[in-house]
Image (cartoon, rainbow, N blue to C red):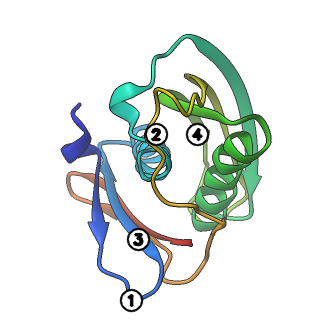
Amino acid sequence: MNRERRYEPLPHTADLGVRVRGRDLPELFANAAYGLSDNLVDLESVRPVEERRIEAGGDDLEDLLVRWLGEVLFLFERDAFVACEFGVVVDCARRDAPSTVRATLRGERVDPARHRLYSEIKAVTYHGLMVAEEPAGWRAEVIFDL
């Protein structure tokens, strides 16, 4: 899937927002992580040469999405690791129940000589957060604090 179809920017006065869609929850969560990562670094220049595994849990789907994206952002901040491929498994019995996400991320450490850095994202917020099931799958909106 090309980058234009993974996410779209959401207009926001001070921060950065993305709208993502997915046929199922794993694709939705992968596309949300792609949207976050692509706003940190130009993902066209990132190669899937390293692998990292992460896991997150949340009280409901919205909380799970924020915590998942927080883990992706933490990898970037702590290890300068940026992922361009996301293999995601979401364990969710009900949207309003505790859920988990496990993922294998493929990417590499940021090399300032090769990677163009974009926004400095400080945090994933709950402001304006939305996860909704639609006839064609799932849609989410999330705002990142710059």
> Residue furthest toward the front?
113
Q: Is residue 47 above or below residue 98?
A: above
Q: CA distance from mark 2 to mark 4?
A: 10 Å
The residue under label 1 is: 13
Q: Is residue 135 above or below residue 89?
A: below
The residue under label 3 is: 17
The residue under label 2 is: 30
Q: CA distance from mark 4 to mark 1?
A: 32 Å
Q: Please rate how many residues cluster around mark 1, counting C-alpha atoms within 10 Å: few if below 14, some from 14 to 19, many from 20.
A: few
Three-letter residue code for mark 2: Ala
Q: Earlier in the sequence, mark 4 or mark 1?
A: 1
Please report contact status of discs 4 and 3: CB closer than 8 Å, yes or no: no
Q: CA distance from mark 2 to mark 1?
A: 26 Å
Placement of the N terminus among the 4 image quadrants: top left
Residue 92 image point, x, y percent: 61, 48
Residue in the foreground of this view, choosing between 113 and 128: 113
Three-letter residue code for mark 1: Thr
Residue in the image at 56% along x and 61% along y = 95
Q: Please rate how many residues cluster around mark 3, counting C-alpha atoms within 10 Å: few if below 14, some from 14 to 19, many from 20.
A: many
Q: Nearer the viewer, mark 3 or mark 1?
A: 1
Q: Nearer the viewer, mark 4 or mark 3?
A: 3
Residue in the image at 29% along x and 65% along y = 9
The residue under label 4 is: 90
Residue in the image at 39% along x and 89% along y = 13
Q: CA distance from mark 3 to mark 1?
A: 10 Å
Residue in the image at 62% along x and 14% along y = 50
